[in-house]
Amino acid sequence: MEGLAQNPWAALAYLIAGVCFILALRGLSSPTSSQRGNRFGMIGMTIAVVTTLVVHAPMRNMVVGNGPVFIDGERATLLDPTALVEILVAIGIGAAIGIVTARRIAMTAMPQLVAAFHSLVGLAAVLVAAAAFLNPLAFGIADMVHPMIGDPFLAIRKVSRIEMGLGVAIGAITFSGSVIAFLKLNGNMGGKPIMLPGRHVINLALLAGILGLIGYFTQDQSPWIFWTITGLSFLIGFLLIIPIGGADMPVVVSMLNSYSGWAAAAMGFTLHNTAMIITGALVGSSGAILSYIMCRAMNRSFISVIAGGFGGDSGGGGGEAKEQRPWKRGSAEDAAFLMSQAEQVIIIPGYGMAVAQAQHVLREMADKLKEEGVRVKYAIHPVAGRMPGHMNVLLAEANVPYDEVFELEDINSEFAQTDVAFVIGANDVVNPAAKTDKSSPIYGMPVFDVNKAKTVLFIKRSMGGVGYAGVDNDVFYQDNTMMLLADAKKMVEEIVKALG
Amino acid sequence: MDFIGILSIFVMACFVGYYVVWSVTPALHTPLMAVTNAISSVIIVGALIAAAAGGLGATGATSKWLGLLGVVLAGVNIFGGFAVTARMLAMYKKKVR
Protein backbone atom coordinates (compact mmCIF):
# COMPACT_ATOMS: atom_id res chain seq x y z
CA MET A 1 0.00 0.00 0.00
CA GLU A 2 1.27 3.47 -0.78
CA GLY A 3 1.90 6.18 1.78
CA LEU A 4 -0.70 8.85 2.25
CA ALA A 5 1.20 11.64 0.61
CA GLN A 6 1.16 9.82 -2.68
CA ASN A 7 -2.46 10.74 -3.23
CA PRO A 8 -2.33 14.45 -4.16
CA TRP A 9 -5.97 15.11 -3.24
CA ALA A 10 -5.51 13.58 0.17
CA ALA A 11 -2.28 15.56 0.66
CA LEU A 12 -4.16 18.74 -0.27
CA ALA A 13 -6.98 17.92 2.14
CA TYR A 14 -4.51 17.38 4.99
CA LEU A 15 -2.84 20.67 4.18
CA ILE A 16 -6.21 22.45 4.37
CA ALA A 17 -6.85 20.75 7.71
CA GLY A 18 -3.48 22.05 8.93
CA VAL A 19 -4.36 25.60 7.85
CA CYS A 20 -7.70 25.33 9.69
CA PHE A 21 -5.78 24.46 12.87
CA ILE A 22 -3.58 27.52 12.47
CA LEU A 23 -6.74 29.65 12.09
CA ALA A 24 -8.18 28.00 15.21
CA LEU A 25 -5.27 29.28 17.30
CA ARG A 26 -5.25 32.61 15.51
CA GLY A 27 -8.86 33.13 16.59
CA LEU A 28 -7.81 33.07 20.24
CA SER A 29 -6.10 36.45 19.90
CA SER A 30 -9.33 38.02 21.14
CA PRO A 31 -12.46 36.70 22.84
CA THR A 32 -14.65 38.05 20.03
CA SER A 33 -12.99 35.93 17.33
CA SER A 34 -12.32 32.92 19.52
CA GLN A 35 -15.54 31.03 18.89
CA ARG A 36 -15.07 31.28 15.15
CA GLY A 37 -11.54 29.96 15.69
CA ASN A 38 -12.85 26.96 17.55
CA ARG A 39 -15.19 26.20 14.65
CA PHE A 40 -12.22 26.30 12.28
CA GLY A 41 -10.58 23.70 14.50
CA MET A 42 -13.62 21.45 14.25
CA ILE A 43 -13.75 21.86 10.47
CA GLY A 44 -10.06 20.98 10.18
CA MET A 45 -10.50 17.88 12.29
CA THR A 46 -13.52 16.78 10.25
CA ILE A 47 -11.53 17.19 7.02
CA ALA A 48 -8.63 15.15 8.41
CA VAL A 49 -10.82 12.33 9.70
CA VAL A 50 -13.05 12.09 6.62
CA THR A 51 -10.03 12.16 4.27
CA THR A 52 -8.41 9.33 6.20
CA LEU A 53 -11.61 7.30 6.21
CA VAL A 54 -11.94 7.72 2.44
CA VAL A 55 -8.31 7.14 1.46
CA HIS A 56 -7.76 4.38 3.98
CA ALA A 57 -11.19 2.80 3.96
CA PRO A 58 -11.03 -0.73 5.34
CA MET A 59 -10.96 -3.13 2.39
CA ARG A 60 -11.19 -6.86 2.02
CA ASN A 61 -10.30 -9.05 -0.92
CA MET A 62 -13.13 -9.74 -3.33
CA VAL A 63 -13.89 -13.42 -3.56
CA VAL A 64 -16.13 -15.13 -6.09
CA GLY A 65 -16.74 -18.81 -5.54
CA ASN A 66 -13.51 -20.12 -4.05
CA GLY A 67 -10.92 -17.90 -5.64
CA PRO A 68 -9.85 -14.29 -5.44
CA VAL A 69 -10.86 -11.96 -8.28
CA PHE A 70 -8.20 -10.15 -10.29
CA ILE A 71 -8.81 -7.00 -12.33
CA ASP A 72 -5.95 -5.90 -14.59
CA GLY A 73 -3.69 -8.31 -12.76
CA GLU A 74 -4.42 -6.70 -9.35
CA ARG A 75 -6.41 -8.28 -6.60
CA ALA A 76 -9.85 -6.71 -6.55
CA THR A 77 -10.96 -5.39 -3.18
CA LEU A 78 -14.28 -4.39 -1.69
CA LEU A 79 -15.20 -2.12 1.19
CA ASP A 80 -15.26 -4.14 4.40
CA PRO A 81 -18.49 -3.02 6.12
CA THR A 82 -17.76 -4.79 9.42
CA ALA A 83 -14.43 -3.05 9.84
CA LEU A 84 -15.98 0.31 8.93
CA VAL A 85 -18.71 -0.18 11.50
CA GLU A 86 -16.08 -1.06 14.12
CA ILE A 87 -14.27 2.19 13.41
CA LEU A 88 -17.46 4.25 13.52
CA VAL A 89 -18.43 2.61 16.80
CA ALA A 90 -14.98 3.46 18.20
CA ILE A 91 -15.42 7.11 17.18
CA GLY A 92 -18.93 7.07 18.67
CA ILE A 93 -17.72 5.74 22.02
CA GLY A 94 -15.00 8.39 22.12
CA ALA A 95 -17.48 11.13 21.18
CA ALA A 96 -19.97 10.08 23.86
CA ILE A 97 -17.36 9.98 26.63
CA GLY A 98 -15.78 13.23 25.47
CA ILE A 99 -18.98 15.25 25.16
CA VAL A 100 -20.46 14.04 28.44
CA THR A 101 -17.21 14.83 30.27
CA ALA A 102 -16.94 18.27 28.66
CA ARG A 103 -20.54 19.13 29.64
CA ARG A 104 -20.34 17.90 33.22
CA ILE A 105 -16.90 19.10 34.28
CA ALA A 106 -16.80 21.97 36.78
CA MET A 107 -14.75 24.95 35.64
CA THR A 108 -12.62 24.69 38.77
CA ALA A 109 -11.64 21.16 37.68
CA MET A 110 -10.31 22.37 34.31
CA PRO A 111 -6.61 21.81 35.14
CA GLN A 112 -7.28 18.15 35.96
CA LEU A 113 -9.35 17.73 32.81
CA VAL A 114 -6.62 19.19 30.62
CA ALA A 115 -4.04 16.91 32.26
CA ALA A 116 -6.30 13.91 31.68
CA PHE A 117 -6.77 14.89 28.03
CA HIS A 118 -2.99 15.21 27.61
CA SER A 119 -2.54 11.71 28.94
CA LEU A 120 -4.97 10.42 26.30
CA VAL A 121 -3.05 12.10 23.47
CA GLY A 122 0.13 10.53 24.83
CA LEU A 123 -1.38 7.08 25.06
CA ALA A 124 -2.92 7.39 21.61
CA ALA A 125 0.53 8.27 20.22
CA VAL A 126 1.98 5.17 21.90
CA LEU A 127 -0.77 3.01 20.43
CA VAL A 128 -0.32 4.41 16.93
CA ALA A 129 3.44 3.92 17.11
CA ALA A 130 2.97 0.35 18.35
CA ALA A 131 0.43 -0.37 15.60
CA ALA A 132 2.84 1.03 13.01
CA PHE A 133 5.63 -1.11 14.41
CA LEU A 134 3.50 -4.26 14.28
CA ASN A 135 2.00 -3.59 10.86
CA PRO A 136 4.46 -1.33 9.01
CA LEU A 137 3.14 -2.25 5.57
CA ALA A 138 -0.21 -0.62 6.32
CA PHE A 139 1.60 2.64 7.04
CA GLY A 140 3.81 2.36 3.95
CA ILE A 141 7.00 2.57 5.96
CA ALA A 142 8.56 -0.83 5.26
CA ASP A 143 10.25 -2.52 2.33
CA MET A 144 10.57 -6.17 1.48
CA VAL A 145 14.24 -7.13 1.68
CA HIS A 146 15.51 -10.09 -0.30
CA PRO A 147 18.87 -11.01 1.17
CA MET A 148 21.33 -13.26 -0.69
CA ILE A 149 21.02 -15.87 2.03
CA GLY A 150 17.84 -16.64 3.96
CA ASP A 151 14.19 -15.72 3.58
CA PRO A 152 12.96 -12.32 2.48
CA PHE A 153 11.75 -10.16 5.38
CA LEU A 154 10.10 -6.81 6.03
CA ALA A 155 12.47 -4.03 7.00
CA ILE A 156 11.08 -0.82 8.45
CA ARG A 157 12.84 2.18 6.92
CA LYS A 158 15.59 3.61 9.10
CA VAL A 159 14.23 7.18 9.19
CA SER A 160 10.83 5.77 10.12
CA ARG A 161 12.40 3.80 12.96
CA ILE A 162 13.87 6.98 14.47
CA GLU A 163 10.57 8.84 14.05
CA MET A 164 8.66 5.93 15.52
CA GLY A 165 11.09 5.60 18.42
CA LEU A 166 10.84 9.31 19.20
CA GLY A 167 7.06 9.24 18.79
CA VAL A 168 6.58 6.35 21.18
CA ALA A 169 9.05 7.80 23.70
CA ILE A 170 7.49 11.28 23.77
CA GLY A 171 4.00 9.77 23.78
CA ALA A 172 4.80 7.52 26.73
CA ILE A 173 6.41 10.38 28.71
CA THR A 174 3.36 12.53 28.00
CA PHE A 175 1.08 9.75 29.18
CA SER A 176 2.70 8.81 32.47
CA GLY A 177 3.66 12.43 33.25
CA SER A 178 0.09 13.60 32.67
CA VAL A 179 -1.33 10.82 34.81
CA ILE A 180 0.83 11.99 37.73
CA ALA A 181 -0.08 15.63 37.03
CA PHE A 182 -3.75 14.62 36.98
CA LEU A 183 -3.47 12.75 40.30
CA LYS A 184 -1.74 15.74 41.91
CA LEU A 185 -4.20 18.30 40.55
CA ASN A 186 -7.18 16.12 41.39
CA GLY A 187 -5.98 15.69 44.96
CA ASN A 188 -5.57 11.89 44.71
CA MET A 189 -1.92 12.47 45.37
CA GLY A 190 -0.44 15.07 47.70
CA GLY A 191 0.74 18.28 46.06
CA LYS A 192 4.02 18.04 47.98
CA PRO A 193 7.01 17.02 45.93
CA ILE A 194 8.22 13.45 46.35
CA MET A 195 11.99 13.43 46.27
CA LEU A 196 13.90 10.30 45.39
CA PRO A 197 17.57 10.21 46.28
CA GLY A 198 19.79 10.52 43.23
CA ARG A 199 16.83 11.22 41.00
CA HIS A 200 18.76 13.46 38.61
CA VAL A 201 21.26 10.67 37.98
CA ILE A 202 18.47 8.14 37.49
CA ASN A 203 16.61 10.44 35.08
CA LEU A 204 19.69 11.27 33.05
CA ALA A 205 20.64 7.60 32.84
CA LEU A 206 17.12 6.73 31.69
CA LEU A 207 17.19 9.49 29.09
CA ALA A 208 20.55 8.30 27.79
CA GLY A 209 19.24 4.74 27.70
CA ILE A 210 16.17 5.78 25.68
CA LEU A 211 18.20 7.79 23.17
CA GLY A 212 20.78 5.03 22.87
CA LEU A 213 18.10 2.46 22.21
CA ILE A 214 16.47 4.65 19.58
CA GLY A 215 19.86 4.84 17.89
CA TYR A 216 20.34 1.09 18.13
CA PHE A 217 16.79 0.60 16.81
CA THR A 218 18.00 1.78 13.38
CA GLN A 219 20.36 -1.20 13.26
CA ASP A 220 18.09 -3.83 14.74
CA GLN A 221 14.30 -3.80 14.54
CA SER A 222 13.75 -6.46 17.21
CA PRO A 223 10.54 -6.01 19.21
CA TRP A 224 12.36 -5.98 22.57
CA ILE A 225 14.05 -2.71 21.64
CA PHE A 226 10.77 -1.04 20.74
CA TRP A 227 9.06 -2.21 23.93
CA THR A 228 12.03 -1.32 26.13
CA ILE A 229 12.00 2.23 24.73
CA THR A 230 8.28 2.36 25.53
CA GLY A 231 8.74 1.01 29.06
CA LEU A 232 11.66 3.28 29.96
CA SER A 233 9.74 6.29 28.64
CA PHE A 234 6.72 5.50 30.82
CA LEU A 235 9.08 5.29 33.78
CA ILE A 236 10.88 8.57 33.11
CA GLY A 237 7.60 10.44 32.62
CA PHE A 238 6.51 9.23 36.03
CA LEU A 239 9.84 10.09 37.69
CA LEU A 240 9.98 13.54 36.08
CA ILE A 241 6.68 14.74 37.51
CA ILE A 242 6.58 13.26 41.03
CA PRO A 243 9.17 15.69 42.46
CA ILE A 244 7.32 18.78 41.20
CA GLY A 245 5.14 20.65 43.70
CA GLY A 246 1.53 21.76 43.32
CA ALA A 247 1.95 25.43 42.41
CA ASP A 248 4.54 24.62 39.75
CA MET A 249 1.76 22.76 37.97
CA PRO A 250 1.09 25.59 35.48
CA VAL A 251 4.55 24.93 34.06
CA VAL A 252 4.08 21.15 34.13
CA VAL A 253 0.71 21.27 32.41
CA SER A 254 2.11 23.58 29.71
CA MET A 255 5.14 21.37 29.27
CA LEU A 256 3.05 18.24 28.87
CA ASN A 257 0.89 20.17 26.40
CA SER A 258 4.05 20.82 24.42
CA TYR A 259 5.12 17.15 24.58
CA SER A 260 1.76 15.95 23.30
CA GLY A 261 2.36 18.20 20.29
CA TRP A 262 5.85 16.87 19.61
CA ALA A 263 4.52 13.31 19.87
CA ALA A 264 1.89 14.09 17.22
CA ALA A 265 4.57 15.69 15.04
CA ALA A 266 6.85 12.65 15.31
CA MET A 267 4.02 10.38 14.22
CA GLY A 268 3.25 12.84 11.43
CA PHE A 269 6.78 12.34 10.15
CA THR A 270 6.24 8.58 10.22
CA LEU A 271 3.01 8.87 8.26
CA HIS A 272 4.21 11.71 6.00
CA ASN A 273 1.09 13.55 7.04
CA THR A 274 1.12 17.36 6.79
CA ALA A 275 -1.91 17.88 9.03
CA MET A 276 -0.20 16.02 11.85
CA ILE A 277 3.11 17.78 11.34
CA ILE A 278 1.59 21.27 11.26
CA THR A 279 -0.56 20.52 14.30
CA GLY A 280 2.33 18.97 16.17
CA ALA A 281 4.49 22.02 15.53
CA LEU A 282 1.68 24.40 16.59
CA VAL A 283 0.87 22.54 19.78
CA GLY A 284 4.52 21.95 20.55
CA SER A 285 5.39 25.63 20.28
CA SER A 286 2.22 26.65 22.09
CA GLY A 287 3.09 24.54 25.13
CA ALA A 288 6.71 25.67 25.04
CA ILE A 289 5.73 29.35 24.96
CA LEU A 290 3.23 28.89 27.79
CA SER A 291 5.90 27.14 29.88
CA TYR A 292 8.25 30.05 29.18
CA ILE A 293 5.60 32.64 30.17
CA MET A 294 4.89 30.75 33.40
CA CYS A 295 8.57 30.43 34.29
CA ARG A 296 9.16 34.11 33.59
CA ALA A 297 6.20 35.00 35.81
CA MET A 298 7.87 33.13 38.67
CA ASN A 299 11.38 34.30 37.81
CA ARG A 300 12.54 30.70 37.76
CA SER A 301 14.39 28.86 35.09
CA PHE A 302 12.68 26.02 33.28
CA ILE A 303 15.44 23.69 34.47
CA SER A 304 14.85 24.56 38.13
CA VAL A 305 11.13 23.84 37.78
CA ILE A 306 11.76 20.52 36.05
CA ALA A 307 14.39 19.59 38.62
CA GLY A 308 11.52 19.88 41.08
CA GLY A 309 11.45 20.03 44.83
CA PHE A 310 10.16 23.58 45.16
CA GLY A 311 7.40 24.17 47.70
CA GLY A 312 8.24 21.32 50.02
CA ASP A 313 8.22 21.33 53.81
CA SER A 314 11.83 22.40 53.81
CA GLY A 315 10.85 25.69 52.18
CA GLY A 316 11.95 27.66 55.27
CA GLY A 317 10.02 30.44 56.98
CA GLY A 318 7.07 28.31 57.93
CA GLY A 319 8.79 26.42 60.72
CA GLU A 320 10.88 27.89 63.52
CA ALA A 321 11.25 31.40 62.14
CA LYS A 322 7.78 32.32 63.32
CA GLU A 323 8.17 35.69 64.91
CA GLN A 324 5.11 37.26 66.46
CA ARG A 325 4.33 40.51 64.76
CA PRO A 326 1.21 42.56 65.31
CA TRP A 327 -1.50 42.47 62.69
CA LYS A 328 -5.03 43.75 62.42
CA ARG A 329 -8.07 41.61 62.09
CA GLY A 330 -11.14 42.96 60.36
CA SER A 331 -14.73 41.85 60.05
CA ALA A 332 -16.96 41.53 57.00
CA GLU A 333 -18.75 44.73 58.07
CA ASP A 334 -15.47 46.67 58.18
CA ALA A 335 -14.55 45.37 54.74
CA ALA A 336 -17.98 46.24 53.33
CA PHE A 337 -17.77 49.76 54.74
CA LEU A 338 -14.26 50.39 53.46
CA MET A 339 -15.06 49.18 49.99
CA SER A 340 -18.36 50.98 49.65
CA GLN A 341 -16.56 54.25 50.47
CA ALA A 342 -13.84 53.58 47.92
CA GLU A 343 -13.48 55.07 44.50
CA GLN A 344 -11.60 52.11 43.06
CA VAL A 345 -11.26 48.53 44.28
CA ILE A 346 -8.87 46.06 42.67
CA ILE A 347 -9.55 42.38 43.31
CA ILE A 348 -6.60 39.97 43.19
CA PRO A 349 -7.82 36.38 42.97
CA GLY A 350 -5.61 33.34 43.50
CA TYR A 351 -5.83 29.59 43.75
CA GLY A 352 -7.65 29.90 47.11
CA MET A 353 -10.62 31.46 45.29
CA ALA A 354 -10.78 28.42 43.01
CA VAL A 355 -10.60 26.02 45.96
CA ALA A 356 -13.35 27.86 47.81
CA GLN A 357 -15.43 28.22 44.60
CA ALA A 358 -15.88 31.86 45.54
CA GLN A 359 -15.98 33.33 42.03
CA HIS A 360 -19.77 33.69 41.78
CA VAL A 361 -20.28 35.38 45.12
CA LEU A 362 -17.25 37.55 44.37
CA ARG A 363 -19.00 38.85 41.26
CA GLU A 364 -22.13 39.53 43.34
CA MET A 365 -19.99 41.58 45.67
CA ALA A 366 -18.54 43.49 42.73
CA ASP A 367 -22.06 44.17 41.41
CA LYS A 368 -23.14 45.60 44.76
CA LEU A 369 -20.06 47.81 44.85
CA LYS A 370 -20.71 49.02 41.33
CA GLU A 371 -24.24 49.99 42.38
CA GLU A 372 -22.62 52.16 45.03
CA GLY A 373 -20.57 53.83 42.32
CA VAL A 374 -17.29 52.04 43.05
CA ARG A 375 -15.01 51.20 40.14
CA VAL A 376 -14.08 47.49 40.34
CA LYS A 377 -11.21 45.88 38.48
CA TYR A 378 -9.69 42.43 38.62
CA ALA A 379 -5.93 41.84 38.49
CA ILE A 380 -4.61 38.45 37.44
CA HIS A 381 -1.09 37.20 37.85
CA PRO A 382 0.12 34.86 35.08
CA VAL A 383 0.74 32.00 37.54
CA ALA A 384 -2.39 32.46 39.64
CA GLY A 385 -4.16 29.11 39.87
CA ARG A 386 -3.01 25.77 38.60
CA MET A 387 -2.85 26.38 34.87
CA PRO A 388 -2.33 29.32 32.52
CA GLY A 389 -5.46 31.47 32.37
CA HIS A 390 -7.19 29.48 35.15
CA MET A 391 -8.47 32.59 36.99
CA ASN A 392 -9.75 34.20 33.78
CA VAL A 393 -11.91 31.17 33.03
CA LEU A 394 -13.36 31.12 36.54
CA LEU A 395 -14.18 34.83 36.42
CA ALA A 396 -15.70 34.41 32.97
CA GLU A 397 -17.79 31.55 34.36
CA ALA A 398 -19.08 33.92 37.03
CA ASN A 399 -20.07 36.40 34.27
CA VAL A 400 -17.35 38.89 35.01
CA PRO A 401 -16.93 40.90 31.78
CA TYR A 402 -13.47 40.29 30.37
CA ASP A 403 -12.79 44.00 29.94
CA GLU A 404 -12.77 44.40 33.73
CA VAL A 405 -9.98 41.84 34.03
CA PHE A 406 -6.39 43.05 33.70
CA GLU A 407 -2.94 41.52 33.38
CA LEU A 408 -0.11 42.26 35.76
CA GLU A 409 1.77 44.78 33.58
CA ASP A 410 -1.39 46.67 32.67
CA ILE A 411 -2.67 47.33 36.16
CA ASN A 412 0.32 47.33 38.47
CA SER A 413 0.88 51.09 38.24
CA GLU A 414 -2.69 51.73 39.40
CA PHE A 415 -2.32 50.44 42.95
CA ALA A 416 -0.92 53.76 44.18
CA GLN A 417 -4.21 55.43 43.17
CA THR A 418 -6.39 52.61 44.47
CA ASP A 419 -8.35 52.78 47.68
CA VAL A 420 -8.76 49.08 48.36
CA ALA A 421 -6.75 46.08 47.13
CA PHE A 422 -8.84 42.99 47.82
CA VAL A 423 -6.68 39.87 47.94
CA ILE A 424 -8.66 36.65 47.81
CA GLY A 425 -6.82 33.33 47.86
CA ALA A 426 -3.53 34.74 46.59
CA ASN A 427 -0.37 35.20 48.62
CA ASP A 428 3.02 34.88 46.95
CA VAL A 429 1.95 37.06 44.00
CA VAL A 430 1.46 40.06 46.32
CA ASN A 431 4.55 39.52 48.46
CA PRO A 432 6.86 42.56 48.38
CA ALA A 433 9.77 40.34 49.42
CA ALA A 434 9.99 39.39 45.75
CA LYS A 435 11.24 42.94 45.15
CA THR A 436 13.19 43.69 48.30
CA ASP A 437 14.57 40.51 49.88
CA LYS A 438 17.38 38.98 47.86
CA SER A 439 17.47 35.88 50.07
CA SER A 440 13.80 35.12 49.48
CA PRO A 441 13.04 32.08 47.30
CA ILE A 442 10.61 34.19 45.30
CA TYR A 443 13.05 37.09 44.78
CA GLY A 444 12.73 38.56 41.31
CA MET A 445 9.24 37.27 40.67
CA PRO A 446 7.03 40.06 39.31
CA VAL A 447 4.38 40.83 41.96
CA PHE A 448 1.40 43.14 42.44
CA ASP A 449 2.31 46.25 44.44
CA VAL A 450 -0.70 45.92 46.73
CA ASN A 451 1.22 47.52 49.57
CA LYS A 452 0.92 50.83 47.68
CA ALA A 453 -2.88 50.79 47.87
CA LYS A 454 -4.52 52.87 50.62
CA THR A 455 -5.98 49.77 52.26
CA VAL A 456 -5.33 46.09 51.72
CA LEU A 457 -8.05 43.58 52.56
CA PHE A 458 -6.50 40.14 52.75
CA ILE A 459 -8.74 37.08 52.90
CA LYS A 460 -6.92 34.10 54.37
CA ARG A 461 -8.00 30.99 56.22
CA SER A 462 -5.70 31.55 59.19
CA MET A 463 -2.52 33.37 60.09
CA GLY A 464 -0.68 30.06 60.41
CA GLY A 465 -0.32 29.06 56.80
CA VAL A 466 2.14 30.63 54.45
CA GLY A 467 2.02 30.65 50.65
CA TYR A 468 3.26 27.91 48.42
CA ALA A 469 6.80 29.24 48.48
CA GLY A 470 6.79 28.98 52.29
CA VAL A 471 7.75 32.59 52.85
CA ASP A 472 6.16 35.05 55.24
CA ASN A 473 4.44 38.06 53.72
CA ASP A 474 5.11 41.58 55.05
CA VAL A 475 1.77 42.75 53.71
CA PHE A 476 0.03 40.91 56.59
CA TYR A 477 1.64 43.18 59.16
CA GLN A 478 1.26 46.54 57.44
CA ASP A 479 -0.67 49.28 59.22
CA ASN A 480 -3.04 49.61 56.30
CA THR A 481 -3.75 45.87 56.00
CA MET A 482 -6.82 44.27 57.43
CA MET A 483 -6.79 40.49 57.65
CA LEU A 484 -10.13 38.80 57.01
CA LEU A 485 -9.60 35.35 58.45
CA ALA A 486 -12.20 32.93 57.11
CA ASP A 487 -13.04 30.67 54.22
CA ALA A 488 -12.98 32.85 51.11
CA LYS A 489 -16.52 32.05 50.04
CA LYS A 490 -18.07 32.53 53.48
CA MET A 491 -16.26 35.81 54.01
CA VAL A 492 -17.36 37.24 50.67
CA GLU A 493 -20.93 36.08 51.34
CA GLU A 494 -20.88 37.98 54.63
CA ILE A 495 -19.49 41.06 52.91
CA VAL A 496 -22.31 40.87 50.36
CA LYS A 497 -24.82 40.69 53.23
CA ALA A 498 -23.18 43.62 54.96
CA LEU A 499 -23.34 45.65 51.76
CA GLY A 500 -27.11 45.12 51.90
CA MET B 1 7.37 13.47 -0.29
CA ASP B 2 10.96 13.19 0.85
CA PHE B 3 12.22 13.73 4.34
CA ILE B 4 13.56 17.23 3.68
CA GLY B 5 10.19 18.25 2.24
CA ILE B 6 8.37 17.22 5.41
CA LEU B 7 11.06 18.70 7.60
CA SER B 8 10.60 22.05 5.82
CA ILE B 9 6.88 22.01 6.54
CA PHE B 10 7.64 21.19 10.17
CA VAL B 11 10.16 24.01 10.61
CA MET B 12 7.87 26.56 8.95
CA ALA B 13 4.96 25.40 11.08
CA CYS B 14 7.07 25.90 14.22
CA PHE B 15 7.61 29.53 13.22
CA VAL B 16 3.92 30.01 12.44
CA GLY B 17 3.11 28.45 15.82
CA TYR B 18 5.54 30.79 17.58
CA TYR B 19 3.94 33.95 16.20
CA VAL B 20 0.36 32.76 16.43
CA VAL B 21 0.69 31.66 20.05
CA TRP B 22 2.36 34.89 21.18
CA SER B 23 -0.63 36.76 19.79
CA VAL B 24 -3.05 34.78 21.96
CA THR B 25 -4.39 36.97 24.74
CA PRO B 26 -3.36 35.69 28.21
CA ALA B 27 -7.00 35.65 29.30
CA LEU B 28 -7.57 32.82 26.83
CA HIS B 29 -4.64 30.64 27.84
CA THR B 30 -6.84 27.94 29.35
CA PRO B 31 -9.02 27.65 26.20
CA LEU B 32 -5.75 27.63 24.23
CA MET B 33 -4.60 24.56 26.12
CA ALA B 34 -7.97 22.88 25.66
CA VAL B 35 -8.07 23.54 21.93
CA THR B 36 -4.45 22.55 21.32
CA ASN B 37 -5.34 19.37 23.14
CA ALA B 38 -8.22 18.76 20.78
CA ILE B 39 -6.21 19.44 17.64
CA SER B 40 -3.21 17.38 18.71
CA SER B 41 -5.62 14.47 18.63
CA VAL B 42 -5.27 14.66 14.86
CA ILE B 43 -3.11 11.66 15.73
CA ILE B 44 -6.43 9.86 15.21
CA VAL B 45 -5.36 9.75 11.54
CA GLY B 46 -2.69 7.18 12.43
CA ALA B 47 -5.11 5.24 14.59
CA LEU B 48 -7.68 5.16 11.77
CA ILE B 49 -5.10 3.78 9.34
CA ALA B 50 -4.13 1.05 11.80
CA ALA B 51 -7.76 0.21 12.53
CA ALA B 52 -8.65 -0.01 8.83
CA ALA B 53 -5.64 -2.03 7.73
CA GLY B 54 -6.32 -5.66 7.16
CA GLY B 55 -3.39 -7.15 9.00
CA LEU B 56 -1.77 -10.50 8.47
CA GLY B 57 -1.83 -12.97 11.33
CA ALA B 58 -1.70 -12.22 15.03
CA THR B 59 0.42 -9.04 14.83
CA GLY B 60 -1.94 -7.66 12.19
CA ALA B 61 -4.92 -8.29 14.46
CA THR B 62 -3.13 -6.72 17.45
CA SER B 63 -2.25 -3.72 15.33
CA LYS B 64 -5.89 -3.34 14.34
CA TRP B 65 -7.13 -3.47 17.94
CA LEU B 66 -4.45 -1.01 19.06
CA GLY B 67 -5.68 1.24 16.27
CA LEU B 68 -9.31 0.96 17.38
CA LEU B 69 -8.36 1.75 20.98
CA GLY B 70 -6.38 4.72 19.68
CA VAL B 71 -9.47 5.91 17.79
CA VAL B 72 -11.52 5.79 21.00
CA LEU B 73 -8.91 7.72 23.03
CA ALA B 74 -8.33 10.34 20.35
CA GLY B 75 -12.11 10.55 19.87
CA VAL B 76 -12.62 11.37 23.56
CA ASN B 77 -10.06 14.12 23.20
CA ILE B 78 -11.37 15.58 19.97
CA PHE B 79 -15.01 15.78 21.01
CA GLY B 80 -14.24 16.55 24.65
CA GLY B 81 -11.58 19.12 23.75
CA PHE B 82 -13.64 21.08 21.25
CA ALA B 83 -16.78 20.87 23.40
CA VAL B 84 -15.09 22.11 26.54
CA THR B 85 -13.34 24.89 24.60
CA ALA B 86 -16.65 25.99 23.12
CA ARG B 87 -18.18 25.93 26.60
CA MET B 88 -15.42 28.10 28.01
CA LEU B 89 -15.35 30.57 25.12
CA ALA B 90 -19.11 31.09 25.38
CA MET B 91 -18.57 32.42 28.91
CA TYR B 92 -16.28 35.28 27.91
CA LYS B 93 -18.55 38.30 27.64
CA LYS B 94 -18.01 41.99 27.29
CA LYS B 95 -19.44 44.49 29.68
CA VAL B 96 -23.09 45.25 29.00
CA ARG B 97 -23.31 49.00 28.81
Image: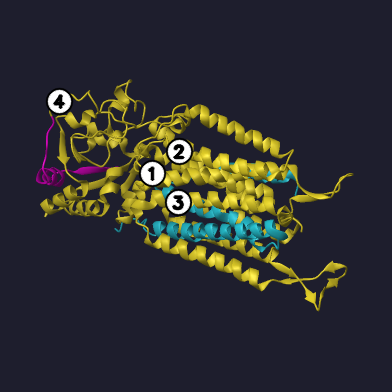
Chain colours: A yellow, B cyan
Q: Which residue is mark 4?
A: A324
Q: Disc 2, disc 4: CB below 8 Å?
A: no
Do marks 4 and 3 share a chain? yes
Secondary-structure class at tag 4: loop
Q: Disc 2, disc 1: CB below 8 Å?
A: yes
- Residue type indicated by callout 1: Lys
Place of residue B58 in the rendered image (x, y in percent of width and height, measured from the top left): 68, 58
- Residue type indicated by callout 2: Ile
Residue A317 placement: quadrant? top left
Q: Which residue is mark 3?
A: A116
- Disc 2 to disc 4, C-alpha distance: 37 Å
* Quarter of the figure that contains the C terminus of chain A: bottom left
Q: Which residue is mark 1?
A: A184
In the rendered structure, which disc, 1 or 4, sits on the residue that comes first in sequence? 1
Do marks 1 and 4 share a chain? yes
Residue B82 painted magenta: no
* Magenta-highlighted residues: A327-350
Secondary-structure class at tag 1: helix
In this rendering, would A94 be left or right of A473? right
